[in-house]
Image: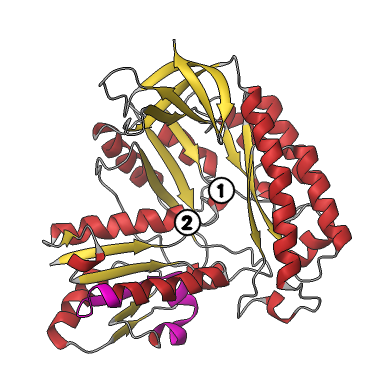
Amino acid sequence: MKIYYCTFGCKVNQYETENLRQRLAEKGYETAENMESADVFIVNTCTVTAQSDRKLRQALGRMKKASPNAVTVLTGCFAQAFEQKARELGCDIVTGTAKGDIPALLEDFISCREQIVSVTPHEKGECFEPMLNLPSGAKTRAFVKIQDGCDRYCTYCIIPYARGHIRSKPLDDIRTEVTALAQGGYKEIVLTGINLCCYGKDFADNTRLADAVETACAVQGIQRVRLSSMEPEMLLDEDIRRLSRLENLCPQFHLSLQSGCDKTLKRMNRQYTCEQYEALCTKLRSTFPDCTITTDIMVGFAGETDEDFAQTVDFVKRIAFEKVHIFPYSVRSGTAAENFGGQVQRAVKEQRAHELEKVCANIRADFLRSNIGKTAEVLFEKEKGDGFHRGYTKNYTPVAVKADSAESWRWQTRQVRIISAADDLCLAEPI
């Protein structure tokens, strides 16, 4: 049987889908290259925004049209947080964020042909679900999930209800997985989690994120270790000192901001102020040469006034983020902010997003131009189908080098000199 995998959302979901694909491949299931050839659809859902839910319904419609008799498995955050709504989508199997039972559930459904709903509630004290991904050779960088769950309960966010309490992968398991990936040829890994900076807080021995990063960086053959999104208030001075000693740690920090207005941050139940956030950015930039700082910003949160939004714009200009992901706030059922007054009209949210995007685009262009004349090491990731070798520097600056021969640079690291900037990337020449 052939399975078509559809993944929405974050790097954690991407990691979990790959883990599921590998386990099902061991049982003889093949991967379908397109919807029309699928006997089974496995849809790993996200539910961060209302748009995620709309995209899910649209995707399910396309799948059922492409292969009407295929078995449909719905898993992930949407199914965990909104079980009843998930039941009503007409999928054959509905399960939550714990995905270990999916192979057995699939076999059960094939035998009985009756809808199976198996969503297990999260409980405090539950263990990290064992997952170890082996090298697949599909990409040049590999995600390694080391943490799950969140206990922060931001007022706009449903994820603590979908993912449960914090839990962490043991250091020995991280070492085993990263070693296998290195032996499989991977040169870069990305440590990821639902709330990455909470890594180790469920352990009794004061283990911290820095321990996990040091473990990964120590594996022979790994040239780069990158960190996914982090909460700014949990990156402490001691963590920064320890991370600064690791030569193969990529100096790129994605620090989720959400708003540059203290009043809005307080309504969101974020655990820092703009002043504290700015101090952290200053410290990172002084500690890590050529460090880049990227972020997420939500516009139009309940109660956000024009003045509040203007403060966010000013804060973004002051920090000069190298890249910003901007999205309008959408009400999530089951969150505290669902009942907040002062909900912002959709047109206003879209206008604010558009205005902030223009500001961030100008800052991004300035950053790319600032790289002209610099030399950098690039790990090339894509074949030269468009006439260019393409890859990223350690601080995640995208670089393209004109291909002058038939040689592939994929999986290779090379020194380049950046000569110009255009179209959200830098153009370079080899040294």
| Badge 1 element | loop
Screen quadrant of the N terminus = bottom left
Residue drawn where x is 45% and y is 87% of the image: 84
Whole-Å distance between the Cαs marked 2 and 1?
10 Å
Name the residue located 70 percent from the left edge and 37 percent from the top edge: 363
- Does 179 sit above or below residue 108? above
Indicate the quadrant containing the C terminus: top left, top right, bottom left or bottom right: top left
Rendering coords of residue 388 (x, y %): 38, 27
Q: Residues within 10 Å of mark 2 (few under 14, many from 20)?
A: some
| Start-end of magenta stretch | 64-86
Residue 221 spot, x, y in % from top left = 32, 26
Q: Nearer the viewer, residue 31 or 232?
A: 31
Instruction: Give whichever of discs 2 and 1 has the lower sequence position.
Output: 2
Magenta includes 44?
A: no
- At mark 2, the secondary structure is loop
Query: Which label was assigned to residue 229?
Result: 1
Q: Amino acid at mark 2?
A: Cys
What residue would you read off at disc 2? 10
